Image (spheres, rainbow, N blue to C red):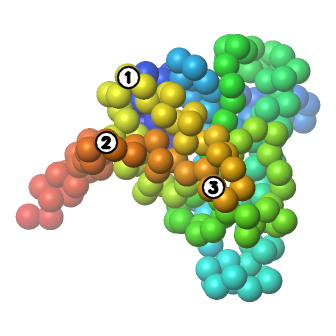
Amino acid sequence: MGTQLALLQAAQVLPEAIYGSPERKTTDFFVVLPRGRLLVEAKSSRPSLGTRTGVTAGDIDLLNKIGHARKQINATVELLEQGNPAVAHLPRDRPVRGLVVTLEPFHNVNTILCEGILPSTAVPTATVSSHDLENVVAILASEPDAGSRILAALTHPGASIPPSLRTAVAGLKNVANPILAECWQRWCATAT
């Protein structure tokens, strides 16, 4: 995940920090952008059948997986606001956004349909699949306004329009992800 985020040339990607006693961890990554900070929590989660079909059992699955990640973002925001030494290396003068990255898409998670299920977050936060993240960072990699685009995409514009990282690449040409392209080439070389 950190390698993918590091494709963003206008960003500095930093790993999680450890704090407290007993020891706890912040979000998995901090992405420092020219005009903002992005807290990224990665979950190798897949939605259960209940989540995919929208039945009540899916609410528990959603809360356990995405809800836990959102709580992690909230805990890290609290550390930032308190000026905790574990996060003192991060700039304090920029807005913060949260991003939960999952292995597979959790459809409707960023919509009003899940508001009553998931805990609220202290900062605007969206959930994205790893596939979408890989595509977006490749497109934004060399864009000078990548940070502004990401912040705008993750700012909830209103109740009827959910935040979506995909909107950060609106109007830009699709670009192949170089990390995935290299993996594909290596696989092809060994498969023949």
Q: Report the disc number at residue 172.
A: 2
Depth order, front residue of 21/121: 121
Alpha-carbon span between mark 1 and mark 2: 13 Å
| Rendering quarter of residue 33 | top right
Alpha-carbon span between mark 3 and mark 2: 20 Å
Which quarter of the rendered picture does the C terminus lie within? bottom left
Which structural element holds mark 2?
loop
Q: Which residue is mark 3?
A: 162
Q: Is residue 95 above or below residue 184?
A: above
Depth order, front residue of 75/127: 127
Which structural element holds mark 1?
loop
- Residue at 64%, 40% (x, y): give it: 155
Identity of the amino acid at label 2?
A: Leu
Identity of the amino acid at label 1?
A: Pro
| Rendering quarter of residue 110 | bottom right
Q: Position of residue 91 (x, y in %)?
A: 67, 14
In the image, taking residue 13 as reference, residue 19 lies left or right, namely right
> Callout 2: 10 Å neighbours few (<14), some, many (20+)?
few
Q: Which residue is mark 1?
A: 144
Alpha-carbon span between mark 1 and mark 3: 25 Å
Disc on the earlier residue, 3 or 2: 3
Q: Position of residue 77 (x, y in %)?
A: 79, 32
